[in-house]
Image (cartoon, rainbow, N blue to C red):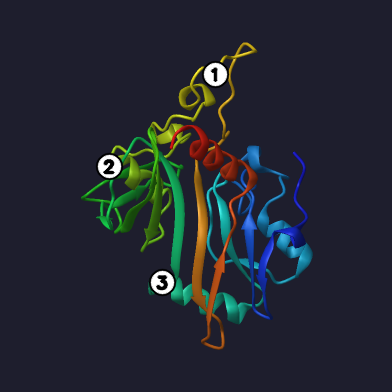
C-alpha cells in the first residue's frame, strides 16, 4: 500500500491542533497484535510532522474523514474535556442498504465492548450510547444518512444503524452488503469472472467536526469525500436515482 503524505491530509492547522482527512485503510493508532506491527498509522505520521502529536479520538481503520490531532498537552487536555462533556459536534455520512426515512431518529441502545473488537447491544451491562439519524438522499436501493453521535462508543454508528435494519453498505460485521454496479446499472454485463464491489470497504465517512480551540473560539472543519466514496455516490446518482 502506498502511504499518504501527511501534509496532503491536513484540512486545518493552528498552533494547537491539526485536523486531517484520514484516508481509508490507515489505522488511527498502533493496532494490537502482530497484524498491526510496523504498519504506518495516523499517529506515527503525525509524530514525524510534529513531535508531541497526540490523537484526540479514533476512527475505525476503514472509516475516512475528519480526525483531530493535538500538537501539545494543553490542547489534548482541552479537547479531552470537551469529549468527556459531549461538547464536540461530529457528523458522519453513511450509505445504507435499503430506503429509510429517518427524520432525526434517536437511537439510545447501550453498547457493550468486550475489549476484543466484539461489540453488542446490552441493556444490562452496556454503556450509554446515543446517536441521531437523518436521511439526506434517497436512491432506489440505498439511502445516504447523516449520523450524529452524542457519545463515542466503538462501532456506535455501525451497530446502531444495524439495529434499525439499515446496515452500512459493505459492513460485513453487521450484515451490510457491498454495492455492485450490476445491481444498479440496467443491462450491465460482467466481462471477467468475478465482479468487484464499487467500494472495497464500508461506506462511512466522518464529514464534519466542531470543537472549541484552547482560546475558546469555535473550530469547524469539513472533510471532502475520498475518491472511493465520491465514486459510489456519483454512480448512485447516475444509475439508482
For residue 22, side relative to residue 120 (left or right): right
- Per the model, the C-alpha gap separating discs 2 and 1 is 31 Å
Which residue is depicted at the point 33% across and 54% down?
Answer: 133
Q: In this view, does 173 lie to the left or right of 213?
A: left
Q: In which quarter of the image is residue 166?
A: top left
Q: Which secondary structure, mark 2?
A: loop
| Tag 3 residue | 84
Return the x and y of residue 21 as percentages of the image width and height. 63, 58
- Percent across and percent down for residue 205 are 52, 51
Dot 2 or dot 1, earlier in sequence: 2
Q: Which of marks 2 and 1 is in front?
A: 1
Residue visible at 49% across and 71% down in the picture: 210
The residue wearing badge 1 is 188
Circle 2 is placed at which residue position?
A: 164
Crowding at mark 2 (Cα within 10 Å: few <14, some 14-19, many 20+): few
**Residue drawn at (50%, 25%) of the image:** 185
Label 1 packing within 10 angstroms: few (<14), some (14-19), many (20+): few
Tell me what residue is drawn at x 58 percent, y 19 percent.
195
- Asked if the residue under mark 1 is in contact with the one under mark 3, i.e. CB atoms within 8 Å, the reply is no
Q: Which label sits in the foreground, 3 or 1? A: 1
Instruction: Provide the secondary structure element on which disc 3 rests.
Output: helix
* Number of the label disc, if any, that sits on residue 130: none
Amino acid at each position: 500500500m502506498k502511504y499518504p503524505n501527511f501534509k496532503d491530509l491536513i484540512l486545518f492547522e493552528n498552533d494547537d491542533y491539526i485536523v486531517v482527512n484520514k484516508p481509508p485503510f490507515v489505522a488511527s493508532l498502533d493496532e494490537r497484535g502482530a497484524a498491526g506491527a510496523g504498519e504506518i498509522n495516523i499517529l506515527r505520521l503525525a509524530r514525524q510532522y510534529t513531535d508531541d502529536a497526540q490523537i484526540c479520538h479514533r476512527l475505525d481503520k476503514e472509516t475516512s474523514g475528519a480526525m483531530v490531532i493535538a500538537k501539545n498537552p494543553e490542547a489534548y487536555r482541552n479537547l479531552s474535556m470537551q469529549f468527556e462533556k459531549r461538547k464536540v459536534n461530529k457528523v458522519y455520512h453513511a450509505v445504507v442498504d435499503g430506503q429509510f426515512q429517518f427524520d432525526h431518529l434517536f437511537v439510545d441502545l447501550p453498547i457493550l465492548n468486550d475489549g476484543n473488537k466484539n461489540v453488542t447491544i446490552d441493556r444490562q451491562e452496556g454503556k450509554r450510547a446515543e446517536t441521531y439519524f437523518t436521511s439526506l438522499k434517497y436512491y432506489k436501493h440505498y439511502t445516504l444518512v447523516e449520523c450524529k453521535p452524542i457519545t463515542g462508543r466503538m462501532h456506535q454508528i455501525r451497530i446502531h444503524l444495524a439495529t434499525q435494519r439499515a446496515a452500512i453498505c459493505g459492513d460485513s460485521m453487521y450484515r451490510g452488503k457491498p454495492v455492485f454496479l450490476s445491481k444498479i446499472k440496467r443491462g450491465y454485463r460482467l466481462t471477467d469472472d468475478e465482479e468487484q464491489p464499487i467500494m472495497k470497504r464500508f461506506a462511512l465517512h466522518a464529514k464534519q467536526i466542531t470543537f472549541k480551540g484552547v482560546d475558546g473560539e469555535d473550530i469547524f472543519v469539513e472533510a471532502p469525500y475520498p475518491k472511493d466514496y465520491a465514486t459510489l455516490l456519483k454512480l448512485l446518482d447516475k444509475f439508482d436515482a
